[in-house]
Amino acid sequence: MKITKEEVLHVANLARLDMDDDAVEKFSEQIGTILSYMDSLNQVETEGVPPTSHAISLNNAFREDEEKDSLERGAALANAPEQEDGCFVVPRIVG
Amino acid sequence: MNLYELTIHEAHDLLRRKEISAVDLTRSVLDRIREIDFRVGAYITVTEETALSQAAAADHAVGEGRIGPLTGIPLAVKDLICTRGLRTTCASKILENFVPPYDAGVIEALKAEGAVIVGKVNMDEFAMGSSTENSAMGITRNPWDLSRTPGGSSGGSAAAVAADMCLGALGSDTGGSIRQPASHCGVVGLKPTYGRVSRYGLVAFASSLDQIGPLTKDVTDCALVLSAISGHDRRDSTSVPRPVPDYIEALRPDIAGIRIGLPREYHSAEGLSPEVSSIIRGAVEILEGMGAQCVEISLPHTPHAVAVYYLIAPSEASSNLARYDGVKYGFRDRDRGDLLEMYRGTRSRGFGPEVQRRIILGTYALSAGYYDAYYGKASQVRTLIVADFRKAFETCDVILSPVAPTPAFPIGEKMDDPLTMYLSDIFTLSANLAGIPGMSVPCGFSAEGLPIGLQLMGNHFDEETLLRVGYAFEQATEVHLRKPVLP
């Protein structure tokens, strides 16, 4: 198998996803098949080939550092699952 | 003729001559949606009230002599383009109740033109899929055969245009998500050059590949919508500051001397159905008959495009989708007390299986120990794919190929076999990897009566040649005039 169940669990943890045994089983099989297919890339000679991250080469998009209106606080909070006193509320982090 | 059957340019002529009103036109489209969409399932949200008030405003503008090509035209928008005050779900449970506080750049552009937005249309969750089956809001059916998928991920956009439930639509294309559903539903779809259209307010899937583009009933309408949404936007730093040409000017049915490149690797690709292949050959003969000159070209790295794409796109997605944490917007799993547990519960219950599969794949490809072998290698082979196209465009003006290896496939056929689903994207992925424009134009029908599109790909920022060749083809045939008959 290209990717073990332990590796799937490890990666799921990095991505903050829970996974039950059935999902681990299914994903390790499917992703294993996909990764085996990806191995075809090893046939391509890429010694000295630079990587491409964007196909259109761009210079950095500079702009003046000007003060501008930003999203109004109420609008920024409007979609929050929980808010209080103009802040996002999250579960307690420190004991 | 019913008003909903009109193309954008036909409706515009009638509006300009005041033979119809935008309100009547919009009502006709809304009635059509009410009448048939329970069978097709193209719309996630229909905005009857605001659409009618936008239409009334358009009529007022027309009365004052202010009319642009899209004024009063009812359009549908893929549900991953932010619309202020209008729910934008990405067809995901995690954004089920998300109401954006701002409009995307393209929505501002449409509103500035006085267009009418009739609703938000279905898609694969976060645009990840080729069939619109990966939607938390239910599937969309192909108007030509309700037992088949419309393609994806912009399946709602394509089905809505094909079934006359809007005059045109916006979709997005990361690996073929405009062109493939356009092909499967018998409409025109164009993915612009990367950077041509602002991505500001487009919910990100794979940022180096995503582009917004039009799906329309004909090539003229495609040029009109493209004109409206193209141009530089400082809020998208990858948007390119380059003047927008007059795309309508490009619509001349004169293609004498245009060199059409036929990639050897595409026309002999494994999995290409003989029926699609022969219809594409027929289209090539029509273009040759009009004076186009065909040249064989080679894109030698084509066989690797699927592997490259399905490493790069999930890698970018795994990073982009890290923002869904149940804190700032969207669904939150309230059953978990601890912060980390809350993240895990929110993401596991909020994302569907295909999105989770790609997050896992992308996180793996970027993780320590595998980065060089997977993401790094794919980014290098991407360079070779870009170089293939650069070389090809030295000997041709436009590249012609199939859009998809088969006509629309039956619902459920590929859902348990992700790799087979991915492989069906072979003809469309490379354009996104290379950043070049690609267009699907209806070119024929299978024996079963399913539409088939041909793909035209052009050099960077040369949408004009695509439109010109597509328009010439359309003028020479009547394929685009055929409409699905809904039972």
Image: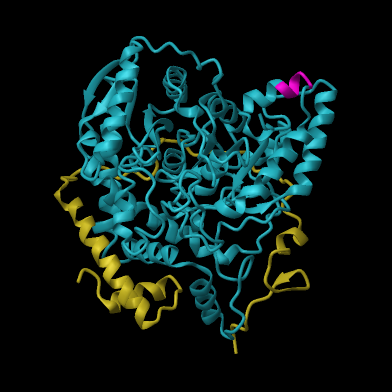
Chain colours: A yellow, B cyan
Judged left or right of residue B164, residue B474 is left
Q: Is residue A2 magenta?
A: no
**Of the pair A70 and B325, the residue shown nearer to us:** B325
Taking the spot 45% from the left edge, 45% from the top edge, the residue there is B177
Picture quadrant of residue A2 = bottom left
Q: Quadrant of the N terminus of chain B?
A: top right
| Residues in magenta, as a range | B14-18
Q: How many numbered marks, from 0 up? A: 0
Residue B180 in the image, given as x and y percentages of width and height: 41, 42
**Of the pair B229 and B154, the residue shown nearer to us:** B154
Judged left or right of residue B427, residue B171 is right
Any part of residue B459 in sight? yes
Residue B299 in the image, given as x and y percentages of width and height: 23, 33
**Of the pair B56 and B24, the residue shown nearer to us:** B24
Vertical order, B38 against A95 (above or below): above
Picture quadrant of residue B353 = bottom left
**Of the pair A18 and B19, the residue shown nearer to us:** B19
Query: Residue pushed farthest front?
Result: B487
Taking the spot 34% from the left edge, 41% from the top edge, the residue there is B404
Residue B195 in the image, given as x and y percentages of width and height: 49, 36
Taking the spot 31% from the left edge, 15% from the top edge, the residue there is B288
Q: Main secondary structure of the magenta part?
A: helix
Residue B373 in the image, given as x and y percentages of width and height: 23, 58
Any part of residue A9 in sight? no
Vertical order, B98 against B166 (above or below): below
Query: Residue pushed farthest bottom?
Result: A95
Vertical order, B223 against B110 (above or below): above
Vertical order, B61 against B430 (above or below): above
Q: Is residue B15 magenta?
A: yes
